[in-house]
Image: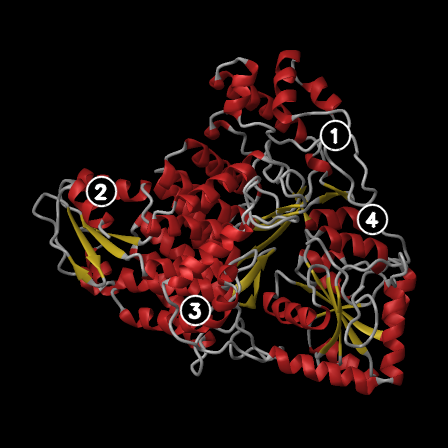
Amino acid sequence: MYTDPLGIPGGAGRLPDPKPLNSISPTYERRGIGEIMAREKEAVPEHRKQNRLIDEVSPYLLQHARNPVDWHAWGEEAFGTAAREDKMVFLSIGYATCHWCHVMERESFEDPEVARVLNEQFVSIKVDREERPDLDQLYMTASQLLSGTAGWPLNLVLTPDKRPFFAMTYIPRERRFGNPGIIDVLSGLARMWQEDREKILTVAAAVTGSLGTSPARGRSPQRSMLDAGFQELLLRYDRVNGGFGGAPKFPIPHNLLFLLRFHRLRGDEKARGMVETTLRAMALGGMYDQLGFGFHRYATDVRWLVPHFEKMLYDQALLALAFIEAWQLTGDRFYERIARECLIFVEREMTSPEGGFYSAMDADTRGEEGGFYLWTRKEIEDLLPAAMFRIVTEAWHLTTAGNFIDSVTGERTGKNILYLARDPGNLADRMGMPGEEVDQVIASARDILHEYRKGREAPITDDKILSDWNGLMIAAFARSGRAFSDPRSLATAEKAAAFILGRMKTGNGELLHRYRNGTAGIGGMAPDYAFLIFGLTDLYMATFRPQYLSAALELQQTFDEAFWDKKNGGYFTSPADRDDLIARQKDLYDGAIPSANSVAFCNLLRLSLLTGDTSHEKKASDLAKLYTDSLTRSPASSTFFLSGLSSVFGPSTEVVIAEGEDRESAREMIRSLDQGFFPFTVVIMRTAENKDELAQIAPFTGNMEADGGKSRAYVCRQHVCSRPVTSLQDMLTLVERT
């Protein structure tokens, strides 16, 4: 049992944190938070009056709007009240689709006795970590300093001037196994606030001082750091099940993106094997929704069988990118199928009518985690023809006892998580059937069960739209459009980009972070700029419309002006004019989502290649020097950054296609680059229609002309271009030259 710096136990509660694709029904009954709030309003008992959160926009805050706790939203009103009344602040951070946040709400925040203690002794504040990732990052760091652990729900106790001195994650209402419950902890803190405040203030000052530290600038990262990152991943690699480390097992797609680049750079077959084994294991396992598609957030076991059933937008985006790149490298249609299915799921279930992408789908339905996705053997037997049932029983390893174990009781529930217990090819051999026939049977069974599942009460959708996560999703749809020559994916990406650029920017060009119910708000943070620029540059290379490259450059300029640390380099998470934080931080660590600095590093290198403006490359070099110490300690802690660093040693190339009257030859060149795996190459298309606008953005293309009626390819490396070629094979030879 961990004891925190104040000597109060409980401060370290740990949280384990086919059918043709175009014929799949696009309809789905989505349950948004607004609908649920309206439905439940009539059933709320009289004593459960709404609190201040009822006027908020965040779905997560609205979920707590009828708790007996007198919640405040983050703001000066709450801290002013705490100062006037000489009370501590209880800060609780979570998000709308968080299972353990729901559990703690039911156990504690809906409990009158817990509410009484909080209302009498504290000023209580709720924060949606997806609305305010800067606050979440700041206080997550504080939690790690105070308790050695972090996760959601994240609960901290602060002084009235926002300084943290106590942290805990999930903690039950009552004492369990000798460990205190939340009332015990809160009561102990209340006594200490009155009797030993000096100790509290000492801890708060020490933690706050540590929060303001910034990574030191070192020397430029060396090529050897790529090898060190690979070796660390190799040591952590699960050779049996794929992935890295033990349970719980997170997908961390940027590990795979880096390994693909390392394979391309070094020719290392182990790196490729690690990626392929991991992608197949995730896609065949319970981590993947075998009926409705899309990936769950993580697996609670090492085999990717038992998922934590949330579906997050960023996971769909980053995993789709990994599967697309695996297809580009291998040509294996399995990876194409999973990438396409993943994007079908997003388009069908997580896309707003305006074109923006929703944030997440919950794990729970009426308090049961995963209930929407689980099946008894009898349910499936009743729905499928006998011959089909026999095959899918073998394929999905359906049992009467089930494979899902209740996280509270530890017992089997009689329900099954659908997963492919065997690779379809092996299953066909085992059953003595042609592989195509087995695939068709499984696909037909999937369609029948998916149609039936639509009649179940679906998990809620967190329907807020976030600029940063949308940027990642735009990149995924754009990349799908390029790789698979899919105009629908491109149209989806363009619609989303138009929505973000049209509805989530201020008049002076600054991004806003969140949109919901017709309202955009919350000033943009570093991930919003970095991730959207990433998506826009991918969209440019998918469409060759200069407007997207122009938009990326305008955002980069705003990003540089408001977030760049002129003294030490790197991007702060929050802009200079944000005054409600006790410290500004820079995030370098690539966790479940890449850090803004890692993505910005890749963006700067890409913008330099696309425009010929070496000032972006200079800024990337300055930024890279902040990573030296952290990469020395843990080379695999920033694998998205290492992907960018791989392109530094790639070598990187710019390919400018000057389209001639023979347009098909230009498009053939583009297709060959889009469908191959060329991670260190950017592609620019110069046409008669866009050449003047393109020359304004990328002046080095101004004299790159077609050869009369023939299209030409100009291949440039380190800002030096080779003689133009008109042959597809000559172009590929120049691109592949090391």
Identify whether 432 is placed above or below 14.
above
In the rendering, at what x and y percent does residue 653 appear? 25, 56
Element under disc 1: loop
N-terminal label among 3 and 4: 4
Cα–Cα gap, marks 2 and 4: 62 Å
Q: Nearer the viewer, residue 97 or 257?
A: 257
Element under disc 3: loop
N-terminal label among 3 and 2: 3
Q: Which residue is mark 4?
A: 42
The residue shown at (12%, 53%) is: 705
Q: Is residue 641 visible?
A: yes
Q: Which residue is mark 2?
A: 669
Indicate the quadrant where residue 369 lies.
top right
N-terminal label among 2 and 4: 4
**How busy is the neighbourhood of tag 2: few (under 14 within 10 Å), some, or many (20 plus)?**
many
Label drawn at residue 509 = 3
Cα–Cα gap, marks 3 and 4: 43 Å
Indicate the quadrant where residue 584 lies.
bottom right
**How busy is the neighbourhood of tag 4: few (under 14 within 10 Å), some, or many (20 plus)?**
few
Q: Identify which amino acid the numbered label 1 is placed on.
A: Gly
> Left or right: 617 with respect to 409?
left
In the rendering, at what x and y percent does residue 715 appear? 19, 53
Label drawn at residue 402 = 1
Q: Nearer the viewer, residue 110 or 141?
A: 141
